[in-house]
Image (tube, grey):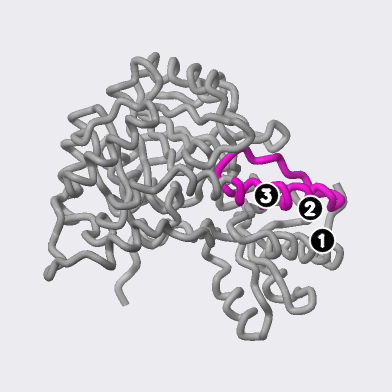
Amino acid sequence: MPSISQKGQSMPDSPIRKLAPFATAAKTAGKRVIHLNIGQPDIETPQVALDAVRQDTRTVIEYSPSEGFASYRNGLAAYYQGAGLDVEGDDILITTGGSEALVFAFMSCLDPGDQVIVPEPFYANYNGFAQMAGVQIVPVTARIEDGFALPPISDFAAKINDKTKAILLCNPGNPTGTVYAPESLDALAQLVRDHDLYLFADEVYREFCYDGAQPKSVLQLPGLEQHVVLVDSVSKRYSMCGARIGAMVTKNVAVRKAAMKFAMARLSPPTLAQIASEAALKTSESYFEQVRDRYVARRDALVKGLRNIQGVTVPNPGGAFYAVCELPIDNADAFCQWMLEHFDLDGDTVMMAPATGFYATPGAGARQVRIAYVLDLPLIERAVECLRAALDAYPGRREV
């Protein structure tokens, strides 16, 4: 029997999806599983995007240009300009989701064996993207006690060596919901300039900042025009996760030309999804105001409920729709599986993502889980009730 490649064997499981068989079994057993494990919002996709696909009259679903339709790229540039960012249509490469944008960035800017520094916990699939590109993630650990704020710049500097080629951020953050302080980004920009690094930034949650927080884009950092590669997506902004449309944005012409080769090799991003995404640019600001209000209400209910459970620690997320909390347990992977296999509260149980998969440091996050508050208030409140009861019943509970 032929062997599996080393790369295939080394690809990590997704902590977000790896418990899916246990959730399926729980449902088969008659339990209701409240899914807080994945960032799949229940928010309605803007009607204007759905209508654009339904009303499209084309008779052939043809390839688009490899870089994406010009009309969409120019419309997306206008969106960025409206947010105060200096972006032109030619700075944009449309991709099959933000995931492909980051893979293209890795493969265009980094060689196998190169290192990219990432503050952890980070979006778990960065591990998989790095494995695909043959690059190494070097973590800098953020602390739950500090609300997962950007670690001190000295921590980043200490990790830099001759293999370091880039720094990767997610702001607002997944899985933490942290919005990085502007002054922290300014300090990081100086480090990038001093060491001539790339700065990759995942800014897909830009619209979702709360309590007056304003996210500072890496495109607003002076002197980094040739260093910055921005990753973006329609998935969360417009609740269009299944559209699989993202963007890679950079002023660096050489990076764009390199990425375009990978784009041509995969032919083109999805045609109908681009039509929907271009139409979504017409979404009114009132849509986002209503969505932010719903997320704030959900966040507040979740954080208040969790903080009322003895032994639970959870920072108040400033953006996105995730929270990482620390539980009084022995092991989050075991606990999350146990909840699906062995626990229910009057037929209800909860699916969460163990946080170990969001860290690169072995053993880090062992008692933490990521919770996505993407469901409406009654389900959030019920999930907190289930979690409280589960912690009382869990045989591996550990008092802090």
Query: What secondary structure is found at the residue carrying circle 2?
Result: helix
Tell which tag, 3 or 2, sits nearer the viewer: 3
What kind of residue is marked 3? Answer: Ala
Q: Name the residue under label 1.
A: 388
Tell which tag, 1 or 2, sits nearer the viewer: 2
Whether residue 320 is in magenta: the answer is yes
Specify which label sits upstream in the sequence, 3 or 1. Answer: 3
Whether residue 377 is visible? yes
Q: Residues within 10 Å of mark 3 (few under 14, many from 20)?
A: few
Alpha carbon of mark 1 to alpha carbon of mark 2: how far?
A: 9 Å
What kind of residue is marked 1? Answer: Arg
Picture quarter containing residue 272? bottom left
The disc at residue 305 is 2
* Residue visible at 36% across and 31% down in the picture: 82
Q: Name the residue under label 3.
A: 297
Q: Position of residue 382 (x, y in %)?
A: 74, 65
Specify which label sits upstream in the sequence, 1 or 2. Answer: 2
Whether residue 133 is visible? no
Picture layout, residue 243 above or below residue 209: below
Q: Nearer the viewer, residue 119 or 275?
A: 275
Query: What secondary structure is found at the residue carrying circle 3?
Result: helix
* Residue visible at 85% across and 68% down in the picture: 393
Q: Position of residue 260 (x, y in %)?
A: 17, 43
Q: Nearer the viewer, residue 158 or 188?
A: 188
Residue 375 in the figure: left or right of residue 40: right
Whether residue 2 is in magenta: the answer is no
Picture layout, residue 300 above or below residue 10: above
Q: How crowded is mark 1: few (under 14 residues within 10 Å), some or many (20 or more)?
A: some
Magenta stretch, residue numbers: 293-321
